[in-house]
Amino acid sequence: MIQKMLKQVGLYLFAALWFVISFYPFVFMVNTSLKGRMEFLIKPVWAFPEKFLYTNYLRVIEGGFFRFFFNSVTVSVISVAIIILVSSLASYVISRVRFRLSSLVYGLFVAGMMIPIHITLIPVYNLTRALGIYDSLTALIGPYVAFSLPISVFVLVGFMRDIPLELEEAAVIDGASRLQIYARVIMPLSKPALSTVAIYSFIMLWNEFIYALVLLTSRKNWNLTMGLWNFHGQYSIDIPLIMATLTLAALPLILIYFVLQEQVIKGMVTGALKG
Amino acid sequence: MKALDHLPWYRRPGVTIFLFLAPALFFFALYVLAPIPVSFFYSLFKWDGIGQRSFIGLENWKELIGDPVFWKALKNNVTLVVISLATQLPMGIALALLLTSRFRWTKLLKTVYVLPYMMSAVAIGMLWRYIYEPTFGLLNMFLEAIGRYDWILDWLGDPKVVLYSVINAVNWQFIPFYMLLFMAALVGIPLELYEAAKIDGASPWKAFWTITLPLLWPTVTNAAVLSLVGSLKYFDLIHVLSGGGPNHASELMATYMYKRSFHHLRMGYGSTIAVALFTIGFALSMVFVRVTSRKQYEGGDRR
């Protein structure tokens, strides 16, 4: 009996400790963002703000935050749309049409998950310069699509394989072309897998940093992670301001997560089930 | 409606297949596959990225072998991999067990435990910089408040400590991910197995080792590969948190490659580091996949 109680207490302690470790940094972030700069330096870090100061947020917004936000939205949405189209076309053929090189093509895409991004940086940097799209949002789309392909193809092929063949046969008898089968039969049935791919890719691209770091230079083109990184260099002594920036930057994904919690979790897990 | 059927070329499966695959292959070949040989090619040159390339044979490779910073970075990468595997997976399993048990509050806890994973590595790096800040950072303030002055350290400034501080932040980011992975796997284990074990008089501890862990093993393998591959190419958070410093104490292959290529504009040498990183990562994950899949088989046999 006592042993059982002790175990319960241990469980609660473990749960509570991890709760604090996961959550307190966020409290620290939001709390600090509402303080004045001097107030932060004089008072203990966990003290609540004397009065809630919104000026930090106003300054962040004046500093061009929405521009970065808008850039991130644009490049992520366009890339995800292309990823969905391109990977579903390929996955349809790989999963449902018999051809000789099928498993080779599939293996090639899936092996892409093991390829570290760094080996592509310098060649992609050069290619981007040669194409004349260096330092533009367009430059990011190619690498973003390419590096999301392996996981997307993996998830979609796995899903499309299980769609009953009879559904496709019926369409063939009705005289549908491959493209029509893809668009009218396979795509509507694959919606769950497509949304997994979309959510997973969106989160990955929204947080992407290294390609943005290598391919973007001018302020007007920065995405959110680049904006953050440079704000940090510019205002590193004004900690409350930095924390306001971080809060604003973290907010969109956290909101998406609160609203679509189950789908997001499913996307994260299935998106990465196999490496 | 049969708009394309009258076109004879369209009915030929070879052409159709190619047309469906072409867009994906285009992006993949251009941005993922082709860069691999191209990087190897660049590694044979001295080049600042803009001017003329000059062929220097294997000079970059000779330099790499004699470069103490590269070896330091490789060693740090190995440390990162080992500690990640040893902490992220067990913590992930422990938290997953907690959240799938009959414990109250699991819904709230799950929501909160996942939060760190929803932040970008750049944001996490910045946040942890102010947690580790020596004079008014959260961690040292806390240690001061509980009177542990002897534990107060310059978390990012002390070369002996910085790597572990950085790894700790990496763990904070990734443990939720492994927790989710293991939760998904735990849900699939039939409850009857535990009931049978209970009837046989097995303790929960024994049930964990004989039922949960063997059935979880395929997921453990997957998670280990993900953690291994992820740790080897880790970049964002370290770049923001410590920049690989002080004096390369927390340098990783990826941060070193970036520095040499884009700060010092030594694209040839940077490519050499990149090829080394690629080769080590690819080879290791292949070996790892083989070894762990064999273990999984043996585990299956024993049961």
Image (cartoon, coloured by chain):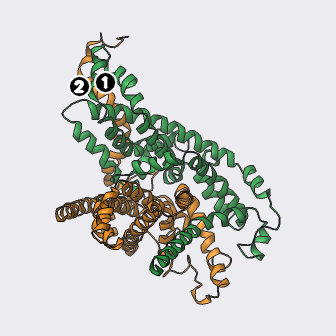
Chain colours: A green, B orange
Identify the element where label 1 is drawn: helix
Tag 1–tag 2 contact (CB < 8 Å): no
B83 vs B47, nearest the viewer = B83
Return the chain for callout 2.
B
Q: Nearer the viewer, mark 1 or mark 2?
A: 1
Neighbours of disc 2 within 10 Å: few (<14), some (14-19), many (20+): few
Residue B96: give x, y in percent of width and height: 43, 62
Residue B18 in the image: above or below residue B37: above
Identify the disc placed on residue B278: none
Q: Are marks 1 and 2 on the same chain?
A: no
Where is residue B119, by image quadrant? Answer: bottom right
According to the image, label 1 marks what residue?
A167
Left or right of A71? Residue A112 is left
Disc 2 is placed on an element classified as helix
Please give the name of the residue rendered at 56% of the width and 62% of the height, measured from the top-left corner.
Answer: B124
Name the kind of residue labelled 1 in the image.
Answer: Leu
Q: CA distance from mark 1 to mark 2?
A: 23 Å
Q: Is residue B247 visible?
A: no
In front here: A163 or B202? B202
- Left/right placement of residue B69 relative to residue B279 reads right
Q: Is residue A115 left or right of residue A28?
A: left
Q: Which residue is mark 2?
A: B14
Q: Residue at x 42, y 60 (%)?
A: B178
Identity, as a three-letter code, of the amino acid under mark 2? Gly
Taking the image as drawn, is residue A200 in sight?
Answer: yes
- Please provide percent x and percent y for residue B91: 43, 68
Which one is in front, B6 or B27?
A: B6
Other-residue count near label 1 (Cα within 10 Å), few / some / many at <14 / 14–19 / ≥20? few
Name the subunit of mark 1. Answer: A
Question: x and y percent of residue B189 in the render?
Answer: 33, 56
